[in-house]
Amino acid sequence: MKKTLFSTLFVLLSIFSYAQDSKHRLNLNPALPVAGKQLTLKYDARGTDLEFSDEVSAVVLLFHNATQWKAHPITLSKVNGSWTGNLVLPADVSFLTLRFFQGNADQPEAADNNGGNGFYSQVLSPKNKPVQGNYLGEAMLCVATDELRLFATPEKDGARVERLLKKESQIRGAIPTEDQLSDIQRYYQFTIKDTLRAEQLQSEIKSRFPKGNTARFISFQRANQEKDQMKFVAGLEHFLEEFPLEKWRENPGSQAYIYYTVYRALATAYFENKDFDKFLTLFKHIDFKTANEIYRWNLTKTEMMGSDEEKKALLPLSSKIMPYLLERKNDGSYREDFAGNDSLINQNVKEQLSDRIFTHISLCKAAGTYQEAADYLQELPEDKKYANADLNEMHLYILEKLGNLKEIKPLLEASIKSNAVTPLMFDKLKEIYLAEHNGLVQGYDNYLASLKSLDALSAMRHHVMENMVSHPLIPFSLENAEGKMVNSADWKDKIVVIDFWATWCRPCIMAFPGMQLLVDKYANDAAVAIYMIGTMQFGDYKKKSVDYVKSKGFRFNLLHDAVGEKGEQNQVFKSLTPLFNSSGIPRKIIVKNGIVRYSSEGYSGSPSQLMDELSMAIEILRAEK
């Protein structure tokens, strides 16, 4: 008798759960769906955005095993004014929700989800009995997580969700997963801002799943919020003892970012404290992404900014870490960053690994371990072997130190084909050419031209033409390195290249060898002038600029950007920001007849490529009538 009463009540509740709309626009047959059997639905679109649609479609989300939502399209046909369709429900379904639309399901022209209330129903088991997920499915629909957001809007009443969870708990074997409870907890906390219910549910989740995601996140958050550095490090170490990475990997979920953050923070602390034993121990457990980022933010940073002595001290660390990187490069740890796109993932791994190899070779060069450097040059991907001008110059240096002189000319020729050559490398190739031609320079320029890739030249011309502009230059007068004034109005008959740079800008400084190649190329051309305008600098910027350029042996025409009313040294650069739409430097422009005709930002990393780019732009402008 009690059993019959419960079943009757259950049916009534279930019918109510899809008949939310007073107009009864959706009718199901049977009224209470049964898993494993056919369900027929009739949808009345009158009074909705779909009323005059010639074709209405439906998608049903089915709640499988009370854990997983799966979408299924339903083909509808119009019968007696209603849109009708059929679906055989899988045996493991306990709840369903529907959405009607016109056009594309993801971006419909019009849609109906019952005004955000949802069209939904519980589904009985194949034996016509209540089953796990009957009320949990409705609770999750109320929460409206991302996959359910198109089917309903979040319920504002947290008490309704709580009631549904209580009803679910009365069904035998009904136990929500930790992820489901966490979704509901976040709904309480962030969607409806019910702090009390959020805290109560969080405590319950932590109690039920002491080694689960919520407990892990709470432990991580507690450690990560510690302000004292020693306590911060101790907290992170305790976190890894409490929630080991290896244990998480047995059933990995969405919290990879926690371990990435913890290992990076610990690595930085160990590195700064020179606790290198602990630093190296971290690499035994971590994936390629985390190891790569730790290397980049610690070793590469020091290699870029440190002295030769500091580089020598880093080599033993790098020599132990590099094998880890090579071993794990294909572990797919960057997959989430590139949404599973294998092409982008592989390209990123190649870029990252090439950069780490560059750093390691630089450290080897500083320490004088040339054979180790040569060995790691072989680890470069084929398309990266000659792509970096600075690395090519180091390669040249290493070959000379190892006495592998026969390999130098092929290296230089391959580097020119890749357009990744430094001034020193040009000098070396010219030296070799002269030695092979009895000191005669005749034919050298043709020889160089023959080494260049026609495809690369075509791509460069396309790039140059894309950066052609036409923007008036506001006339200015700036002080040069000798304290004299230079007026832009005097440039009427010249093509003038301007490089905006600053002493604090590393890419600007890295581009100097390329600018020197350009200066040397046009040194005897009265129709072309090149100026380096220091901008956005501070303190005694004039002395800093002049001293730096002289100390490095560059032969530039220096100008100092003008200072504004508030002391900002950027007036000429600022006057051009409507053209740039950016405040980034380095920035190269080319001026002809008082008009800015070319503008490009950044630095490719290759001196020869920079020279060729600007030379091509100059010659295109010169050829204009």
Image (cartoon, rainbow, N blue to C red):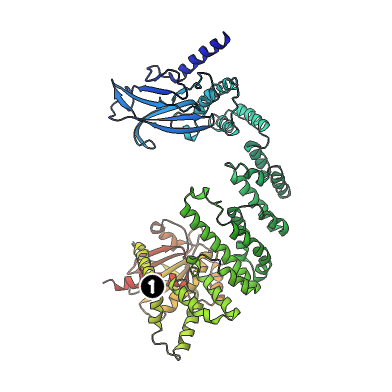
The 10 Å Cα crowd at callout 1, few under 14, some 14 to 19, many 20 or more, is some
Residue furthest to the bottom: 438
Q: Quadrant of the C terminus?
A: bottom left
Residue 515 spot, x, y in % from top left: 46, 72
Total count of labels: 1
Is residue 189 shown to the viewer in this render?
Answer: yes
- Identify the residue under disc 1: 615
Residue 145 spot, x, y in % from top left: 50, 33
Q: Secondary structure at mark 1?
A: helix
Is residue 484 shown to the viewer in this render?
Answer: no
Q: Report which quarter residue 52 is drawn in.
A: top left
Residue located 63% across and 30% down the image: 199
- 211 vs 495, nearest the viewer: 211
Residue 159 spot, x, y in % from top left: 56, 22
- 453 vs 366, nearest the viewer: 453
- 315 vs 511, nearest the viewer: 315
Q: Quadrant of the N terminus?
A: top right
In the image, residue 479 sits, relative to residue 9, either above or below, namely below
Residue located 32% across and 71% down the image: 620
Residue 580 spot, x, y in % from top left: 41, 58
Image position of 288 (left or right of 536): right
In the image, residue 457 sits, relative to residue 296, either above or below, namely below
**Residue type beneath disc 1:** Ser
Residue furthest to the left: 625
